[in-house]
């Protein structure tokens, strides 16, 4: 086993910040990893970010995280949750990364949805209007029903209170990639050469197991796909998150032992 462990960069999902990993990062730090949880661009500006957030795209997010990744002396491990899981894939295609841990990741360009819920959710975004040019405020009802659904009401309210607006353009590029001529979220599978662990919750409706399986399949034998039974989308903080962290730690430990 190597004497010094690779640093870990954890990339949060939509409407969140680096705070989303407050619990999840602790077992990794206890195991001796140096953990970084950066905020995506403008996600540290609270409830009223600059209007410029609405025009920030997925490539902007990826460029910011890639710059951080390249600043390390050795390639770090990159872990990403939800939208952050897609950012992680985009970064790993352009920057040196030791391994990827994808937690309920969003799919890159070209990966078809596997459920009617995904299709309907994407279509519902058109009701927002000029989606690609403005910040989108979070929705308690959506978060409570489909992301924070395994939290108690007190926990759910506390987490949601920290949610912030999300980029309309980035949301469009993820949810309506078929209408995006720039193919902003396209990732060539062959450009990612590191080992990949894909973990998703069995009850996740936002990025369901069938779709995450398709993501893992793109990377062939480089990817390990596993379903965490009973988990929903917020598997980084809902009841039982420790088992998810332990599985990722065990997988990373096997890599370190090689």
Image: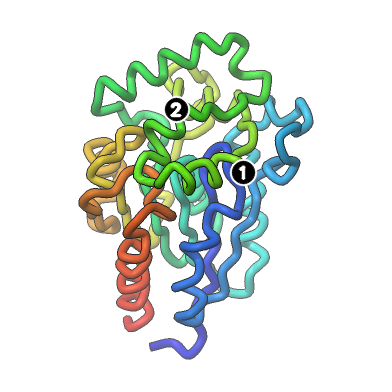
Q: Position of residue 47 (x, y in %)?
A: 71, 35
The one of 100 and 154 positioned closer to us in this rendering: 154
Residue, x 52% and y 67% (percent of image)?
8
In which quadrant is the C terminus drawn? bottom left
Which is more N-terminal, label 1 or label 2? 2
Can residue 89 be seen? no
Can residue 250 be seen? yes
The one of 49 and 162 positioned closer to us in this rendering: 162
Q: Position of residue 79 (x, y in %)?
A: 46, 58
Q: Is residue 40 left or right of residue 210?
A: right
Q: Classify mark 2: residues with Cα within 10 Å, few (<14), some (14-19) or many (20+).
A: few
Please give the label number shown on residue 142. Answer: 2
Q: Position of residue 183 (x, y in %)?
A: 50, 27
Residue, x 54% and y 46% (percent of image)?
159
Q: Classify mark 1: residues with Cα within 10 Å, few (<14), some (14-19) or many (20+).
A: some
Colour approach in the figure: rainbow
Residue, x 42% and y 41% (percent of image)?
148
Q: Secondary structure at mark 1?
A: loop
Q: Is residue 118 left or right of residue 49?
A: left
Please give the label number shown on residue 214. Answer: none
The one of 217 and 208 positioned closer to us in this rendering: 208
Residue, x 46% and y 62% (percent of image)?
24
Q: Is residue 58 left or right of residue 209?
A: right
Please give the label number shown on residue 162. Answer: 1
Asked where in the image residue 98 lies, by quadrant, the reply is: bottom left
Q: In the rendered view, would you say 103 is above or below 147?
A: below
How many numbered tags mark residues here? Answer: 2
Whether label 2 touches label 1, CB < 8 Å? no
Q: Position of residue 21 (x, y in %)?
A: 52, 58
Q: In the rendered view, would you say 8 is above or below 202?
A: below
Q: Is residue 194 left or right of residue 204?
A: right
Work out how far the residue at label 2 is from the one at label 1, CA to CA, in angstroms: 15 Å
């Amino acid at each position: 086993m190597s004497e010094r462990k690779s640093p870990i960069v954890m990339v949060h999902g939509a409407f969140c910040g680096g705070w989303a990993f407050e619990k999840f990062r602790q077992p990794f730090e206890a195991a001796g990893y140096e953990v970084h949880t950066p905020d995506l661009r403008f996600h540290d500006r609270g409830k009223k970010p600059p209007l410029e957030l609405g025009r920030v795209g997925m490539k902007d997010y990826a460029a910011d995280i890639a710059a951080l990744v390249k600043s390390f002396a050795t390639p770090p491990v990159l872990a990403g949750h939800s939208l952050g899981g897609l950012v992680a894939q985009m970064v790993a295609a352009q920057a040196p990364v030791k391994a990827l841990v994808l937690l309920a990741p969003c799919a890159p360009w070209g990966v078809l949805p596997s459920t009617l819920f995904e299709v309907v959710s994407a279509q519902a975004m058109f009701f927002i209007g000029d989606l690609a040019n403005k910040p989108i405020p979070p929705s308690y009802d959506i978060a409570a029903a489909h992301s924070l659904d395994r939290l108690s009401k007190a926990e759910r309210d506390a987490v949601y209170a920290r949610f912030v607006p999300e980029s309309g353009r980035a949301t469009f590029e993820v949810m309506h990639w078929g209408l995006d001529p720039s193919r902003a979220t396209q990732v060539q599978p062959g450009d990612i050469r590191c080992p990949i662990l894909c973990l998703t919750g069995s009850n996740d409706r936002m990025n369901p197991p069938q779709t995450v399986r398709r993501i893992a399949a793109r990377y062939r034998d480089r990817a390990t796909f596993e379903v965490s039974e009973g988990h929903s989308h917020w598997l980084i903080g809902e009841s039982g998150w420790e088992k998810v962290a332990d599985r990722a730690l065990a997988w990373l430990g096997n890599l370190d032992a090689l």
